[in-house]
Amino acid sequence: MDTPPRVLTVAGSDSGGGAGIQADLKTMLALGVHGMSVLTAVTAQNSLGVQGAWELPVEAVRAQYRSVVDDIGVQAVKTGMLSSAELVDTVAELLAGTDAPVVVDPVGVSKHGDPLLAASALDSVRTKLLPTATVATPNLDEVAQLTGIEVRDEADMRRAADAVLGFGPRWALIKGGHLAGDAVDLLTDGGAELWLRAPRHDNRHTHGTGCTLASAVASGLAKGLSVPAAVRAAKGYVTGAIESGFALGAGIGPVDHGWRLRDQCA
């Protein structure tokens, strides 16, 4: 049997299964790549929020990364929750020595507003992590954290993209899901510009959208797609996952990572 493309996620665990490592691996399976993981933190998390978070030692993160990359190899890497400057620095160093496209999701806060990145780590994200990125995928809250730009309309999204590109990623994908109207994202490398629009579904169960989108982009890159093609495919997958999101617990439920599989089995 042919070995599928291999994608590595470097992120935190979501015990509720909607975001983090769990969302990443579900997305990778749904999109036909082999998912692997480097765990950076353990969270106690459910549909209501994050009740606790425990960062893993740098030595454990480094050992996991080297174990996977040196033996199995990777065709793409996706990063998520890196809660401290020490972790950001370590992961950036590892990524710089890896010959594979990198998707950086600069996770700052959870869907419920819980902080997942120390303020002291922001400079490391800007100066060390983002320069390793093939694609950076900040949402509007993360854009404000990183650049100080408050995005209120599409013109602001252009300004935000320019500011993010100034930190060194090859492409910036500014996610405009928090704006009113259609769900619009902007992908640009400072020259080419691609606006991705999708209808906004009346579904509050959207936990894990950022992790899912970044993992879907990484999966496309691992398959050999160009950045614009990978992002376009990822947008379509996430839009369907949001439309199919389901209630779980008493709060915000997850997107449905298996929506295409369920359609096939119906």
Image (cartoon, helix red, strand yellow):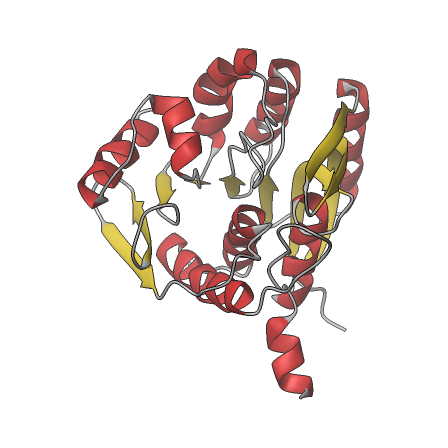
Identify whether 135 is placed above or below 118.
below
Residue at position x 81%, y 25% in the image: 60
Residue at position x 60%, y 35% in the image: 98
Task: Determine which quarter of the picture holds residue 164.
Answer: top left
Among all residues in the image, which is located at the extreme top?
A: 120
Q: Is residue 43 left or right of residue 236?
A: right
Does residue 65 appear in this view? no
Task: Determine which quarter of the picture holds residue 247.
Answer: bottom right
Residue at position x 22%, y 42% in the image: 153
Among all residues in the image, which is located at the extreme bottom?
A: 266
Identify whether 119 is placed above or below 52.
above
Q: Is residue 206 left or right of residue 264?
A: left
Task: Determine which quarter of the picture holds residue 166.
Answer: top left
The percent coordinates of residue 205 (x first, y second) are 57, 57
The percent coordinates of residue 6 (x first, y second) are 67, 54
The percent coordinates of residue 260 (x first, y second) are 60, 75
Q: Is residue 36 left or right of residue 139?
A: right
Viewer-proximal residue, 241 or 79? 241
Identify whether 208 is placed above or below 123.
below
Viewer-proximal residue, 199 or 211? 199
